[in-house]
Amino acid sequence: MRISIQHQTHYRFDQPVWHGVQRLRLTPRDCAMQKVLGWQLSVQGGAIECSYEDHNRNLVSLISLGTGNGEITITGQGMIETYDKAGVVGTHTGFMPLWRLANPTELTKPGPKIRALAAKFSDDGSNTIAVLHDLMAAVNKAVVYEAGHSGAATTAEAALATGKGVCQDHAQVFMAAARLMGLPARYVSGYLVIEGRVDQDAGHGWAEVHVPGLGWVGFDAANDTCPDDTYVRLAVGADYRDAAPVTSMAQGGGAAVLSVAVQVAQQQVVEQ
């Protein structure tokens, strides 16, 4: 499938910023599930200072905010060719060791609710994929999707305790339980084609688990399915914070109002 994406993030400050830095994980890269046909990253109200590959092999850009500016607009846009691999991304690469991804983070630290959920599943290695599918279905049932109920700082334990959340929460609950089963897990930020809906309020998020013999395999507990060719991977990390599209630090500026506009659409391919 060929997918066009435009992701625009706009910050408006109530006072001028005199110094600020933002880290962008807004550039997708090729993998078994996708090929980047073209991508452009642009900034208004700031400047791209450098780009590099981080410990998770994400393509990262650092930008500086223009001195005295009251707003900044960041836009990532391009075209991606995607392939249905039943969620299988494959071999682990990058500097992040698998053992680190098998351990909890602040956002995925298990409490009584996560431990009780994970205790319902056991994996002797003979049918790990089936066990993970059952876990995914259980998370989907345990956490009802409700926009605005949680935020970037919401932990997996808190989301499961309330039984409400968004895709970020589904992914992190699933990851926390998978790690208790001894499996490395990571968060994926990206995009999802939604039938009949081009304009979206945000990107999407799901989990990947490192399965012996297969490598990384995706699980979208929010939709109770493995990613197919309607998904575009953007960045990965130990949790949401480690893969967030934009993180920032600013001095001055006062309060900031954030708005995000995402457009994701399937494009028709005309064969000649």
Image (tube, grey):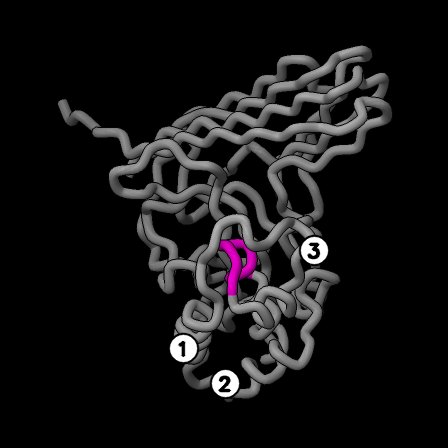
Residue drawn at point x = 76 percent, y = 29 percent: 255
- Residue denoted by label 2: 121
Cα distance in 3D space between marks 2 and 3: 27 Å
Mark toward the start of the polypeptide (1 vs 2): 2
Badge number at residue 75: none
- Residue denoted by label 3: 96
Percent x, y of residue 136: 44, 70
Cα distance in 3D space between marks 3 and 1: 28 Å
Percent x, y of residue 19: 84, 21
Q: Are marks 1 and 2 in contact (CB under 8 Å)?
A: yes
Badge number at residue 134: 1
Q: Nearer the viewer, residue 148 or 19?
A: 148
Residue drawn at point x = 49 percent, y = 39 percent: 202
User: Could you tell me the amino acid type at mark 2?
Assistant: Phe
Please identify the quadrant where the C terminus is shown.
top left
| Secondary structure under the numbered disc 2 in the rendered image | loop
Residue drawn at point x = 21 percent, y = 29 percent: 268
Q: Is residue 29 above or below residue 189?
A: above
Q: Residues within 10 Å of mark 2 (few under 14, many from 20)?
A: some
Q: Which residue sits furthest left?
A: 272
Q: Is residue 128 above or below residue 95?
A: below
Percent x, y of residue 12: 67, 21
Q: Nearer the viewer, residue 150 or 185?
A: 150
Of badges 2 and 3, nearer the viewer stands: 2
Mark toward the start of the polypeptide (3 vs 1): 3
- The magenta stretch is 164-171
